[in-house]
Image (spheres, rainbow, N blue to C red):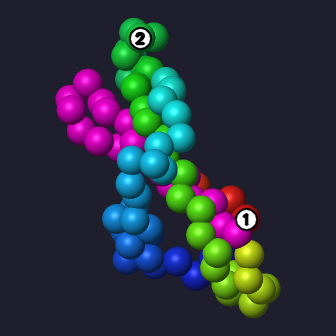
Amino acid sequence: DLGLSINDVAARLLELRAHNYHKSLWCKKSHKEGVHLREEKLWLPCDAYRLQRRERIQENNREGDVDYYFKLCLTPMKTVVMLVSVHL
């Protein structure tokens, strides 16, 4: 547990700038049982952004570099899906 609230994650998201762009990639959606989609409909265009911060880790009360990766994907319905991962 990193002790991050939704507000903490939103604050990190708002820190992103153009220089935080990491790469563009295609991401495959999870397949829902009983839903049949053509293979090409399972892939979404995504842009990944990386934010590196020096933070105190609550779990061990030590300071270190934390990498936040924000993956933003656009669905066929023009909805944005965001996945956030944290790397210590």
Q: Quadrant of the C terminus?
A: bottom right
- Three-letter amino acid code at disc 1? Leu
Q: Is residue 64 above or below residue 38?
A: below
Q: Is residue 70 above or below residue 23?
A: below
As drawn, which residue projects farthest toward the bottom?
61
Q: Residue at x 24, y 38 (%)?
A: 79
Q: Give the image quarter of residue 34.
A: top left
Can you tell which of label 1 and label 2 is closer to the viewer?
1
- Three-letter amino acid code at disc 2? Glu
The residue beneath circle 2 is 40
| Left-right relation of 1 to 6 | right
Q: Residue at x 20, y 29 (%)?
A: 77
Q: Quadrant of the N terminus?
A: bottom right
Please tell me whether mark 1 sits on a helix, a strand or a loop.
loop
Query: Residues in magenta?
Result: 65-84
* Marks 1/2: CA–CA distance: 34 Å
Q: Residue at x 41, y 11 (%)?
A: 40
Q: Residue at x 31, y 33 (%)?
A: 74
Prevailing SS of the magenta stretch = strand
Q: How many marks overall? A: 2
Residue nearest the viewer, comparing 58 with 39: 58
The residue beneath circle 1 is 88
- Is residue 34 something that shows in the picture? no
Q: Is residue 44 above or below residue 6?
A: above
